[in-house]
Image (spheres, rainbow, N blue to C red):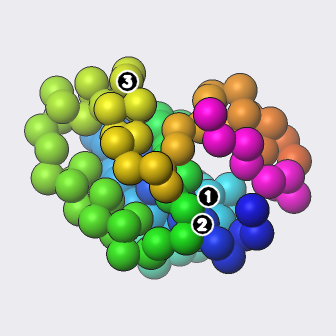
Amino acid sequence: MSKSSYFWVYILHCENNAYYTGYTTDLIKRYQSHQDGSGQCKYTRSFKPLTIAQCWLVEGDKALAMKIERQIKSLSRAMKKELIMKPEILCVHQYVHTISHQELQRMMNDPGLSPTPR
């Protein structure tokens, strides 16, 4: 899967114990920009992310990634926690995949690697 053919939807757990949701084409680079404050996001400049709480790989469709991001943002905190604990709930579409925490860690250690969806 080429890098340009997928998008990431992610939830960050921030230092104020809140969740921040976004989408991107490069999860590792975007996470680093949230951490160092170099990105456009004012929220994570004020409340640094502690970790990527959960993420999903969305194949090929930016509109679908944006729709999922919007749906997650509209959820209550309790529902976001449930989604983090059970990420497969979001995988009702054939083009949406969960990524294990081990796979995410592997990608963070070697940003050149491609994701292997579950």
In the depicted view, which residue is nearer to us: 104 or 46? 104
Using the numbered discs, state the Cα–Cα distance from disc 3 to disc 2 in whole angstroms: 22 Å
- Is-magenta flag for residue 115? yes
| Amino acid of disc 1 | Leu
Which dot, 3 or 1, sits closer to the camera? 3
Kindly identify which numbered label has been placed on residue 27: 1
Which region shows up in magenta? 111-118
**Left or right position of 72 against 38:** left
Residue 48, position in %: x, y?
Answer: 46, 49
Any part of residue 111 in sight: yes
| Mark 3 secondary-structure assignment | loop
Residue 91, position in %: x, y?
Answer: 40, 41
| Amino acid of disc 3 | Lys
Label 2 packing within 10 angstroms: few (<14), some (14-19), many (20+):
some
Q: Residue furthest front?
A: 94
Task: Tell me the residue that label 3 is attached to.
Answer: 86
Task: Say which quadrant the N terminus sits in.
Answer: bottom right
Using the numbered discs, state the Cα–Cα distance from disc 3 to disc 1 in whole angstroms: 20 Å
- Is-magenta flag for residue 16? no
**Left or right position of 7 against 107:** left
Q: Which mark is first along the chain, 2 or 3?
A: 2
**Left or right position of 61 against 66:** right
| Mark 2 secondary-structure assignment | strand
Rendered view: 44 above or below 77: below
Using the numbered discs, state the Cα–Cα distance from disc 1 to disc 2 in whole angstroms: 11 Å
| Mark 1 secondary-structure assignment | helix
Q: Which mark is first along the chain, 2 or 1?
A: 2
Task: Tell me the residue that label 2 is attached to.
Answer: 6
**Marks 1 and 3: in contact by CB < 8 Å?**
no
